[in-house]
Image (cartoon, grey):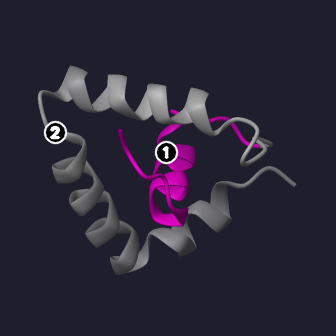
Amino acid sequence: MAILDIHILRACWYMGLFEFGISLPRDYARLEQRFLEFSSALGNPPSVLDAIMWDDMRAGGSRLVRSHVPR
């Protein structure tokens, strides 16, 4: 289980792991599964990936994501 909050959503949008236009909570289970698969493929527990994404997005990721959001 993973808890997807805004920093994970933004990081995954930026990486192309989640597509823009998703609808929460409707798509939550599918997004959670993709995040867990990604975490597993990297060989890291979801909690570690979450912490890394949170720190990176806190350091300027919102600016990066806004520059890549389709208009």
Classify residue 48 as left or right of residue 3.
left
The quarter holding residue 60 reads: bottom left
Q: Disc 2 on helix, strand or loop?
A: loop
Q: Amino acid at mark 2?
A: Pro
Q: Residue at x 46, y 26 (%)?
A: 33
Q: Which residue is mark 2?
A: 45
Query: What stretch of residues is rendered in magenta?
Result: 1-20
Work out whether 6 lies above or below 39.
Answer: below
Residue 2: within the magenta? yes
Classify residue 44 as left or right of residue 8.
left
Q: Disc 1 on helix, strand or loop?
A: helix
Where residue 11 appears, as percent x and y from the top left, is 46, 53
C-alpha gap between disc 2 and disc 1: 16 Å
Q: Amino acid at mark 1?
A: Cys
Q: Callout 2: 10 Å neighbours few (<14), some, many (20+)?
A: some
Q: Are marks 2 and 1 in contact (CB under 8 Å)?
A: no
Closer to viewer: mark 2 or mark 1: 2
Q: Residue at x 33, y 67 (%)?
A: 54
Classify residue 64 as left or right of residue 59.
right
- Most extreme residue toward the bottom is 59
Q: Which residue is mark 1?
A: 12
Work out whether 51 lies above or below 30.
Answer: below
- Most extreme residue toward the front is 1
Foreground residue, 51 or 24?
24
Query: Disc 2 or 1, which lies upstream in sequence?
Result: 1
Where residue 34 appears, as percent x and y from the top left, is 46, 26
- Which quarter of the rendering shows the C terminus? bottom right
Residue 44: within the magenta? no
Where residue 9 appears, as percent x and y from the top left, is 54, 53
Foreground residue, 43 or 60?
43
- Which quarter of the rendering shows the N terminus? top left
